[in-house]
Amino acid sequence: MKPNVTSWFLVSFSKGASDQRLKMSVTSWFLVSSSPREMIFVGREDCELMLQSRSVDKQHAVINYDPSSDEHMVKDLGSLNGTFVNDLRIPDQTYITLKLSDVIRFGYDILL
């Protein structure tokens, strides 16, 4: 049986430059750590997905995959600059279910 692979993009924006888009797949989520994970921590330090930005906290957010419902969710871990889904800041410590076309932003300048 062939796995269902959904396309994801990692997009980096910087002042005065056009966006740089890196294609990712669902499989890539599981390659950022040494073993398959259902939770991916996002931040500047000691996280599976490390983003080098002053507006991203050391442990900023978590992306969770629920295999029983086949849904991805994101939760802000009380970061200073927030986590945004489609430019709307999500509440701290609350899981938000993601849809295929959603854009996630961590802090000010990193989009996923």
Image (spheres, rainbow, N blue to C red):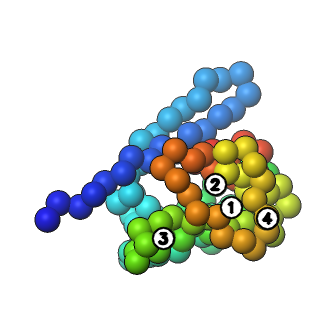
Distance in Å between CA atoms under marks 4 and 1 = 20 Å
Task: Name the residue carrying label 3.
Answer: 65
Of residues 82 and 35, which is closer to you in this image?
Answer: 82
- Callout 2 amino acid: Leu
Front tag of 1 and 3: 3
Distance in Å between CA atoms under marks 4 and 2 = 21 Å
Disc 4 and disc 2 in contact, CB within 8 angstroms: no
- Callout 1 amino acid: Arg
Front tag of 4 and 1: 4
N-term-proximal mark, 3 vs 4: 3
- Callout 3 amino acid: Tyr
Mark 3 residue crowding within 10 angstroms, few (<14) / some (14–19) / many (20+): some
User: Which numbered disc covers residue 51?
Assistant: 2
Q: Secondary structure at mark 2?
A: loop
User: Which numbered disc covers residue 44?
Assistant: 1
N-term-proximal mark, 2 vs 3: 2
Task: Name the residue carrying label 4.
Answer: 91
- Callout 4 amino acid: Pro
Distance in Å between CA atoms under marks 3 and 4 = 19 Å
Distance in Å between CA atoms under marks 2 and 3 = 20 Å
Mark 4 residue crowding within 10 angstroms, few (<14) / some (14–19) / many (20+): some
Disc 2 and disc 1 in contact, CB within 8 angstroms: yes
Which image quarter is the N terminus in? Answer: bottom left
Left or right: residue 53 compared with residue 101: right
Distance in Å between CA atoms under marks 2 and 1 = 5 Å
N-term-proximal mark, 4 vs 1: 1
In this rendering, does residue 47 appear at all?
no
Q: Secondary structure at mark 1?
A: loop
Front tag of 2 and 3: 3
Q: Is residue 95 above or below residue 108?
A: below
